[in-house]
Image (tube, rainbow, N blue to C red):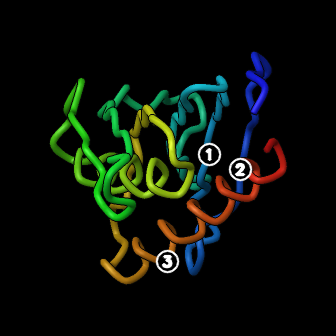
Amino acid sequence: MEPSFKPVHISFPMPRHPHLNFHAHLSFMGNCTMAHLTTTNIAEDESTVPPMGSLVYAMPDMRNDRNVISTPLATSGSNIDYATRMAKVLARKMKHPVYVGCSMDFTGMTAEEEMEGFAAAVDQIMERWDSKS
């Protein structure tokens, strides 16, 4: 894959929560990918800026396709688990290192709704990745 310095932006409403929008800023750099993820709630004031959140680095294990090594670089208690899961899934699917910054807010969502949103986010990100490859 050729490195790209032009980021790809994704935005869509979360499944079963049309008032909550998912946003991703993706940079495919050839030897790694950076993904910055956040949510916005259209019912709230749009001028509020979400906090930086967590930053996680993950890379696939070249000896075992199912194993991914990850480490948190910056942590925010409310979204470190989501950032870690996303980084591991993307690193495994892309087969190269990934940095994931995450300031997602799932207040008021059930675990099932959060997982639906996670799956939708992975699908959208991998669709952009496949189109760049």
Q: Residue at x 47, y 66 (%)?
A: 118
Is 42 left or right of 132, judged from the image as shown? left
Residue topped by disc 1: 23
Q: Residue at x 37, y 39 (%)?
A: 59
Indicate the quadrant where residue 132 lies.
top right
Circle on res. 116 = 3
Q: CA distance from mark 2 to mark 3?
A: 15 Å
Q: Residue at x 52, y 34 (%)?
A: 36
Residue 48 vs 89, above or below: the answer is above
Secondary structure, mark 1, is strand
In this rendered view, identify the residue nearer to me: 86 or 22.
Answer: 86
Q: Is tag 2's residue or tag 3's residue first in the polypeptide sequence?
A: 2
Amino acid type shown at disc 3: Glu
Secondary structure, mark 2, is strand
Amino acid type shown at disc 2: Ser
Residue 98 vs 12, above or below: the answer is above
Amino acid type shown at disc 1: His
Residue 10 vs 48, above or below: the answer is below
Is 80 left or right of 130, judged from the image as shown? left
Q: CA distance from mark 1 to mark 2?
A: 4 Å
Q: Is tag 3's residue or tag 1's residue first in the polypeptide sequence?
A: 1
Circle on res. 11 = 2
Circle on res. 78 = none
Is 12 left or right of 14, judged from the image as shown? right
